[in-house]
C-alpha cells in the first residue's frame, strides 16, 4: 500500500492515529483524513515510464562505486529530494537490473508472495508495485484478470476496494499486469489470505459428466470413506462430485470462506489450514491473527463492511460471477488494510442472468456465494474472543 505525507486537514492528534484501510488515517474513535497520492506516485500511473525509470535506477558499474563497508547498510543522501529518495530506496531494496525477469520471479518472490497464493507469478517491479504473470492457459487475446481489473478500476464503487491497477505489459515474451504492492509500507505485519465463496471452481470446469478413475483415487487418498457405495463399485467419480467434495473438506461449502494462509510477525507463514473448517476453529484462527489488538479488529471489520457495501452497489458484480477471489488483510502497529484480489476466474454471466452472490449454487445459476461468505467473515471477526494481555485487560472492550 502506498503511503504519502500529503493529507487533507489532518488534526494534530494524528501523531497518535493510524493509517487505516483504503488509505484512511484513523484514531481509536474516528477517521481524521484521507491520504492523497503525491506527484511522484502519480508518475507510476503512466503506461510507458515503469521500465524506463527502472533502467535509470540501475546501479553504476562496480568500478564506479566506492568500496562498500562490510555489514553496514548504505545511507540515503543527506539532501535527497523525494524523487531521489524513491530511486535510492528502489535500488537498495530491490538491487535489480530489470523487473520481472525469470531469475527475479524465482529468486525475489518472498514469503509474502508465497503466502498470497501466487508462488512464481508475482515479483516486485518498482516502488510500491508488483508484476503478476498472466494465468497459465489463458489465450493470448483473452486475459480475464486484466479485464476485471480494468473494469473495476473504472468502477466508482469498486476502485477503492482493489489494488491499484496500472497497466498490462509484455516482458521477455510473457504478459504481466502491474498492480499496487499491498505490502509496501508495512513493517513486519500480520497478513491473512482468505478465499471467498461457497464455490471456487467455474461451471465449465465441471460440465463434463464423465466419471473418472483418477479423481476417485484422489478422493480416496484424501478420505477413504468419502465415496458412496456406488462410487466404490465403479471406482470413478465426476469432476463436479470431486470438486464439491474438496469444498466440503474446508469451510468453503458451509461458511462461504476459507482461511488459506496466515503470517504473524517473526514467524513463518501458516499454510496448512485445510482442516480449519468448523466455526470455532475459524474463530480461534482469527483470534490468533488479531492478537489483542482491538483497534485492528474494529478497523478490519469496518473496512470489510465498506467493501461489502461497495460490492452490493456495483453494477459490474450484478452481471459477473467472482469465483476464487480472495480478501487480503494486512495490519501492523500503525496501519490496517483489506482488499479484494484475484480475478482470474471472474466471468460475465449469460445475458439475462443476474446474481446476488448469496443464493445457493445450482448448475447454471452462476451463484458463487461471495457475499454469503463475506457476511460470515465479518461476523467471525467481530465475535472472535481475543486474548487479553495484562495491560489490555485494564481497558474497556471497545468492540462491544
Image: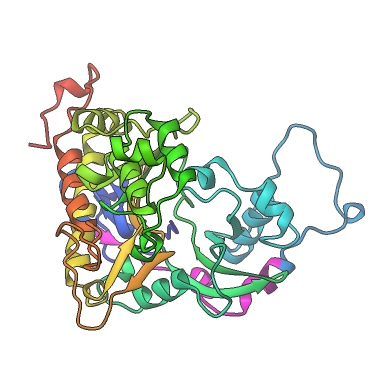
Q: Can residue 264 be seen?
A: no
Q: Quadrant of residue 159?
A: bottom left
**Quarter in which the N terminus is drawn:** bottom left
Please tell me which residue lies in front, 87 or 103: 103
Name the image quarter holding the C terminus. Answer: top left
Q: Quick check: can you spot residue 201? A: yes
User: Is 56 placed above or below 377 here?
Assistant: below
> Which residue, as the protein is rendered here, is positioned at the far right?
63
Residue 333 rendering spot, x and y as whole percentages: 36, 38
Query: In terms of depth relative to the viewer, which is nearer, 11 or 101?
Result: 101
Residue appearing at x 39%, y 42% in the figure: 234
Q: Which sits in the foreground, 308 or 292? A: 308
Q: Residue furthest top?
A: 390
Residue 75 vs 155, above or below: the answer is above
What percent of the width, then of the height, locates residue 8?
Answer: 29, 66
The residue at the point 18 percent across, 74 percent down is: 354
Q: Residue at x 68, y 49 (%)?
A: 106
Against 149, residue 96 (above or below) is: above
Q: Nearer the viewer, residue 357 or 207?
A: 207
Which segment did they paint magenta? Answer: 33-54
Is 37 positioned to the left or the right of 323 in the image? right
Q: Is 100 inside the magenta-drawn segment?
A: no
Q: How is the image coloured?
A: rainbow
Amino acid at each position: 500500500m502506498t503511503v504519502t505525507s500529503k493529507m487533507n486537514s489532518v488534526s494534530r492528534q494524528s501523531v497518535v492515529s493510524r493509517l487505516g484501510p483504503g488509505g484512511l488515517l484513523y484514531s481509536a474513535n474516528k477517521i481524521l483524513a484521507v491520504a492523497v497520492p503525491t506527484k511522484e506516485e502519480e508518475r507510476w500511473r503512466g503506461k510507458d515510464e515503469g521500465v524506463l525509470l527502472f533502467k535509470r535506477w540501475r546501479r553504476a558499474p562496480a568500478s564506479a562505486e566506492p568500496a562498500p563497508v562490510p555489514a553496514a547498510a548504505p545511507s540515503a543522501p543527506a539532501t535527497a529530494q523525494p524523487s531521489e529518495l524513491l530511486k535510492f530506496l528502489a535500488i537498495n531494496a530491490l538491487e535489480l537490473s530489470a523487473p520481472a525477469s525469470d531469475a527475479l520471479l524465482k529468486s525475489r518472490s518472498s514469503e509474502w508472495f508465497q503466502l498470497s497464493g501466487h508462488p512464481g507469478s508475482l515479483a516486485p517491479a518498482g516502488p510500491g508495485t508488483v508484476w503478476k504473470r498472466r494465468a497459465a492457459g489463458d489465450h493470448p487475446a483473452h486475459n480475464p484478470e486484466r479485464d476485471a481489473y480494468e473494469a473495476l478500476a473504472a468502477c466508482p464503487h469498486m476502485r477503492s476496494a482493489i489494488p491499484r491497477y496500472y497497466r498490462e505489459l509484455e516482458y521477455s515474451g510473457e504478459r504481466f499486469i502491474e498492480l499496487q504492492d499491498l505490502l509496501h509500507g508495512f513493517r513486519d505485519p500480520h497478513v491473512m489470505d482468505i478465499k471467498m465463496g461457497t464455490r471456487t471452481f467455474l461451471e465449465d470446469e465441471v460440465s463434463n459428466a464423465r466419471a473418472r478413475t483418477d479423481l476417485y483415487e484422489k478422493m480416496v487418498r484424501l478420505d477413504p470413506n468419502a465415496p458412496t457405495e456406488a462410487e466404490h463399485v465403479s471406482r470413478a467419480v465426476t469432476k463436479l462430485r470431486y470438486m464439491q467434495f474438496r469444498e466440503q473438506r474446508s469451510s468453503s461449502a458451509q461458511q462461504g470462506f476459507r482461511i488459506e494462509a496466515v503470517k504473524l510477525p517473526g514467524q513463518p507463514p501458516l499454510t496448512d489450514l485445510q482442516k480449519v473448517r468448523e466455526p470455532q476453529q475459524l474463530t480461534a484462527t482469527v483470534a490468533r491473527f488479531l492478537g489483542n489488538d482491538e483497534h485492528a479488529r474494529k478497523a478490519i471489520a469496518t473496512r470489510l463492511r465498506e467493501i461489502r457495501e461497495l460490492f452490493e452497489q456495483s453494477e459490474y458484480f450484478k452481471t459477473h460471477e467472482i469465483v476464487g477471489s480472495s480478501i487480503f488483510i494486512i495490519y501492523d502497529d500503525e496501519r490496517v488494510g483489506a482488499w479484494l484480489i484475484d480475478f482470474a476466474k471472474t466471468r460475465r454471466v449469460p445475458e439475462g442472468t443476474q446474481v446476488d452472490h448469496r443464493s445457493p449454487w445450482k448448475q447454471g445459476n452462476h451463484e458463487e456465494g461471495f457475499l454469503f461468505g463475506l457476511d460470515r467473515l465479518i461476523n467471525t471477526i467481530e465475535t472472535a474472543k481475543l486474548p487479553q494481555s495484562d495491560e489490555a485487560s485494564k481497558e474497556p472492550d471497545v468492540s462491544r
